Amino acid sequence: MYYSSIYIKVMYLFGFLLLRVFSKGDQNVPYDVHYNIIYGNQHVVSFNQGRELQISMDNSSGSGFGSKMNYGSGYFHMKIKLPNRDSAGVVVAFYLHSNTNLHDEIDFEFLGNREGQPYNLQTNVFANGEGGREQRIHLWFDPTADFHNYKILWNNHQIVFFVDKIPIRIFKNNSNIGVGYPQQPMQLLATIWDGDDWATNGGYTKINWSFAPFKANFKDFKIGGCPIINSNDNHNCNSQDYWWNKRKYWELSFKQRRLYKEYRAKYITYDYCDDIPRYSIPPQECSINMIKKKM
Ligand SMILES: *[C@@H]1O[C@H](CO)[C@@H](O)[C@H](O)[C@H]1NC(C)=O
Ligand SMILES: *[C@@H]1O[C@H](CO)[C@@H](O)[C@H](O)[C@H]1NC(C)=O
Ligand SMILES: *[C@@H]1O[C@H](CO)[C@@H](O)[C@H](O)[C@H]1NC(C)=O
């Protein structure tokens, strides 16, 4: 009896360790399991058997990679380290994009800056071809010194942008009052490109090509998403079998809400909802947020 119970415990432990090794292994898959290089092949280098990817841009080309599949919901993440030194005018993007005429898109765009000046992280949401929902936030750490985790939660209740564990933006499904909400299958992409006509100080601060090539590094290529095999699959992606669709992910937790308020109060540098010259009447989703702010 005694020995067999020890034996069972050992087997449990062994099984547990095995599980850990495998799930860790899965987390750490080479990029080419789920992604392809989509452009600028000669500007992409992989390290550590494909577990880290570096994309770069010089005056001849940028580069990028994208998921092989499209997704209908998910909790997408990527560890990213941004170009160091002077990166003014350089844009690194990590985003979801539907390849359609009236497209849906959910964006992280890292807007480079002169050396020593902070990066702006811009986020945007397009639904049915309609965007113009930019927000910008200063990062509270040096994103060029190390990898940080950037995440997009997308279910049919909300879209949340996370920087490490901090939720920096929420876009609610307000389709019941006529606000567009992304619902088309989207591809996950990461790119580096020349945005110097707008990205830094409204386009006044240009790329200094003597600092090229600009290099961004990526890690952690597992994808937590609902893959769409054919376009009729879409409805399955709201299933609660996917953990990011469960009730817990329909809104922020109390603690997340507190962090959201705290970090936004300190680090937001631009919010389209407050841009009166641009939108004399703020878009509908903004007034809903205002009501929430006052509550
Ligand atoms: C691009 O950069 C290379 C290397 O710095 C330089 O030799 C070349 O003249 C540049 N080309 C253009 C079109 O600016
Ligand atoms: C948004 O919410 C509505 C209910 O208000 C729901 O019918 C719809 O499916 C949701 N949209 C998406 C894209 O998930
Ligand atoms: C680009 O950077 C180099 C090296 O710091 C500097 O000498 C040069 O003046 C810069 N060019 C522009 C246009 O700012």
Image (spheres, helix red, strand yellow):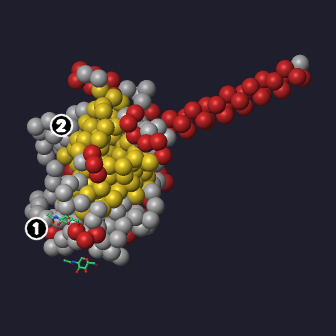
Residue ID at (61%, 31%): 19
Residue positioned 40% across, 63% down in the render:
143
Q: Which mark is residue 99?
A: 2
Query: Residue 144: x, y in percent?
Result: 40, 64
Relative to 50, 214 lies left or right: left
235 horizontally vs 179: left or right: right
- Choose top left, top right, bottom left or bottom right for residue 196: bottom left
Query: Is the shortest distance between ligand 2 and the CB of mark 2 under 8 Å?
Result: no
Crowding at mark 1 (Cα within 10 Å: few <14, some 14-19, many 20+) = few
The image shows residue 223 at horizontal and vertical percentages of: 40, 37
- Residue identified by numbered label 1: 277
In this view, 233 is above or below 208: above
Query: Of all residues shown, which one is farthest toward the right?
Result: 2
Q: Residue at x 23, y 45 (%)?
A: 39
Numbered disc total = 2
Point out residue 248 in the picture as x, y percentages from the top left corner.
45, 39
Q: Nearer the viewer, residue 219 or 102?
A: 219
Please tell me in which quadrant of the rendered image residue 270 appears: bottom left
Relative to 66, is 208 above or below? below
N-term mark: 2 or 1? 2
Query: Horizontal placement of 57 versus 226: left or right?
Result: left
Q: Amino acid at mark 2?
A: Asn
Q: Residue at x 50, y 35 (%)?
A: 26
Identify which amino acid the numbered label 1 is placed on.
Pro
Q: Is residue 56 visible?
A: yes
Asked if the beta carbon under badge 1 is closer than 8 A to the nearest atom of ligand 3, the reply is no
Classify mark 2: residues with Cα within 10 Å, few (<14), some (14-19) or many (20+): some
Give residue 82's position: percent from left, percent from top. 36, 60
The answer to which of 268 and 199 lies nearer the viewer is 199
Mark 1 element type: loop
Q: Looking at the image, which is closer to me, 50 or 172?
A: 50
